[in-house]
Amino acid sequence: MDLATLEIFLAVAGDRSVTKAAKAIGRVPSNVTTRIQQLEQDLGVALFSRDGKKMTLTGEGETFLAYANRLTALALEARQAVRPLTPSGNLCLGTMESTAASRLPAPLTQFNRMWPDVSVRLTMGVSPELTRSVLAGELDCALIARPPQAVLAEQQSFSDDLQKLQSELIFVEELIVLLPPGHPDIKSASDLRVGSLAALEPGCTYRRVAEFWARKSSAVKTMEVGSYHAILASVATGQAAGVMPKSVLELMHWLGNARMHDLGPVETFLVSRRGDRASALDAFHDVLVATRGKAPHLPPG
Amino acid sequence: MDLATLEIFLAVAGDRSVTKAAKAIGRVPSNVTTRIQQLEQDLGVALFSRDGKKMTLTGEGETFLAYANRLTALALEARQAVRPLTPSGNLCLGTMESTAASRLPAPLTQFNRMWPDVSVRLTMGVSPELTRSVLAGELDCALIARPPQAVLAEQQSFSDDLQKLQSELIFVEELIVLLPPGHPDIKSASDLRVGSLAALEPGCTYRRVAEFWARKSSAVKTMEVGSYHAILASVATGQAAGVMPKSVLELMHWLGNARMHDLGPVETFLVSRRGDRASALDAFHDVLVATRGKAPHLPPG
DNA sequence: AATATAATTCCCGAATAGAGACTGATCCTT
DNA sequence: AAGGATCAGTCTCTATTCGGGAATTATATT
């Protein structure tokens, strides 16, 4: 029983789905299935009941869930306790709007609880800018979306900058096109019955991925709006389709009547300068990996 | 960071020696070295300071030790908490004298604390008898010493019985011949200046291993005595050399002036009937593996 | 009934862990 | 002070494990 197994278990328990959990933690479903089965065999008890295609926790599963949370929390605490330098000072963290909204609250809260002496300075921006800022030393690290290879190939300097930094996969976002109410399902951009795609600034990776997708079959224009709330508002008017990660949409309690089209996964990486052993950065990194895959609300303790 | 790594760390921290720890948990020293190094690299801090051939815990190592203990204890608790059937009733456990004295107090205390509804019935005996009793259903499980292949080959029925049972390595005992004070070091049994070897009953595995060793170079007789205390007494008189596991000797605060000769490792296995899924047995098994390698005193909590 | 979705199974290539031989340093003995 | 023993660590080889992808099965949905 290692902590990676517990992370997998927590993800499945949180999403009640092998497929979703696999996406969330950047693994393949077959792997998740196997690890869960191994865990169950190791413990000698069924953690989930498989009623058809639903994964629901059994009573024992609920019990184990509590322990899994405590165990991972304790392991994180152990890591932090032996950290050679006590983190303090500033941590300049760059992040995308979407990540700041959907993923960051939990780990940031946890981090502040553990290291009150570190003041986190949050900078919002789009991935290429953030990456450049890390390289320039203006930021200690940043959470950025690395587009798929086909899209990245069009952004030479972004790609070059990424090469010079060390990066680690943290989240996998499911990028979607949100359709206005009543809009029929689409197979490609040519099926769009709206005037434009609502997205953020030009540099935004999600926007670029969406534009790359749209270009293949349509000449639809992109409309630039200032925030995800503004995107939602645009979609609500029926005049645009919105581009955003699914996690952001879920955050907004909009789920019920929304049609969406899947543009595939986009990976979020934590990037920092190679060999940068700043203590606060390391600590933040550990909190990030310990928190990912868990339920979005704050962990106990 | 998995629990196996923590077990290795705990063993090294307890013995302050890679070699000893490796023996205690049935691994090879190079493996222990590597795993400790990996752990240190993962945590980014030195857990041990290597002054020559001594391994001493660093300050961070001490800190981490506390967490490692809590982590393994919590993991054990998690396993027990999801156990499908609550263990209760009787657990008939067979054990050798030596194991009962040196290894069993800690896990038995822990087990009683966790499952007060199980009454453990302890039966002492020598390995072949205990094995036979497990097979016959008189015992649920037993801790027995499986002699090296050369010796086991002479005990056909013992060997046959073992084949029919499932077994798992739990401890590795270092079997020694304890020499009387003032006795010169020996290379083989022919160097013995005493009239006999003091050992327990004829069926005792340790006795058989010792006799096997003695036969190769000497005609020294074995003297049968009733207990390890009696063996020590015999040795103290200067008339016999005593056969026992090192862990028993260490238990008796006799270490200082004692010369001993090493007869090599003898493995202690937990044996039970194949497919026997008795809950209490499983629970005891888990406690046993969680406790092995730790310091002999009782774990916290 | 047909389709889509999700979990699982199977298989293969890659990564990892453990065993064993060897090295170099240190401690103890003579 | 020299020689031997002991111990941590290194290196290499091999066996096992693990993760990814395609195929399969089962279950909801339309």
Image: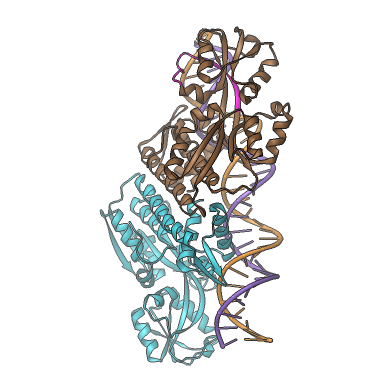
Chain colours: A cyan, B brown, C orange, D purple
**Compared with residue A34, is residue A125 higher up or lower down, i.e. above or below?**
below
Residue A124 lies within the magenta run: no
Q: Which residues are magenta?
A: B252-265
Percent across and percent down for residue B25 are 54, 36
Front one among A155 and C30: C30
Q: How many marks?
A: 0
Front one among A86 and B232: B232
Residue B257 lies within the magenta run: yes
Q: Quadrant of residue D11?
A: top right
**Compared with residue B300, is residue A65 higher up or lower down, i.e. above or below?**
below
Q: Is residue B210 visible?
A: yes
Q: Is residue A273 visible?
A: no
Q: Quadrant of the C terminus of chain A?
A: bottom left
Q: Residue at x 57, y 72 (%)?
A: A52
Q: Residue at x 53, y 10 (%)?
A: B180
Q: Quadrant of residue B178?
A: top right
Front one among B43 and A277: B43
Percent across and percent down for residue B266 are 60, 28
Residue B162 left/right relative to A12 = right
**Compared with residue D20, is residue A200 higher up or lower down, i.e. above or below?**
below
Percent across and percent down for residue B39 are 47, 44
**Compared with residue A38, is residue B270 higher up or lower down, i.e. above or below?**
above
Percent across and percent down for residue B244 are 56, 21
